[in-house]
Amino acid sequence: MKRRRHAPEQIVPKLAVADKLLGEGKTVEEVCRELEMTESTFHRWRNQFGAMKADDAKRLSQLEADNARLKKIVADNEVEIDVLCEVSRGNF
């Protein structure tokens, strides 16, 4: 199978289709083959996104992006504080 990257907004609907197919009596193997994913990917997605809706998944990705941006800001501020401490000590 070709390796693909899926956004959370794409994963949640695929899991909904998988639940529907499993409810119809298909096996996990058949569902994965139909949705073009491996069983390990299916189980990993189920554990990570199982109870989410598409809007929740989209909000999660936005929060993760915001979190990364804030972590970068904090790291930059820490570097500035270290530089200012060194300058105030006269160790430059």
Image: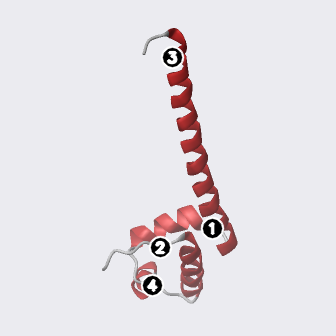
Query: Mark 2 = which residue?
Result: 6
Residue ID at (57%, 84%):
17
Residue 51 in sight: no
Residue ID at (54%, 62%):
47
Q: What number is the disc on residue 57?
A: 1
Mark in front: 4 vs 2: 2
| Secondary structure of residue under mark 3 | helix
76 or 88: nearer the eye?
88
First in sequence, mark 3 or 1: give its number. Answer: 1
2 or 74: nearer the eye?
74
Q: Are marks 3 and 1 in contact (CB under 8 Å)?
A: no
Query: Mark 3 = which residue?
Result: 87
Q: Are marks 4 and 3 in contact (CB under 8 Å)?
A: no
First in sequence, mark 2 or 3: give its number. Answer: 2
Q: Residues within 10 Å of mark 1 (few under 14, many from 20)?
A: some
Query: Mark 4 = which residue?
Result: 35
In space, the residues marked 4 and 1 are separated at their CA atoms by 19 Å
Q: Is residue 57 left or right of residue 4?
A: right
Q: Are marks 4 and 2 in contact (CB under 8 Å)?
A: no
Mark in front: 3 vs 1: 3
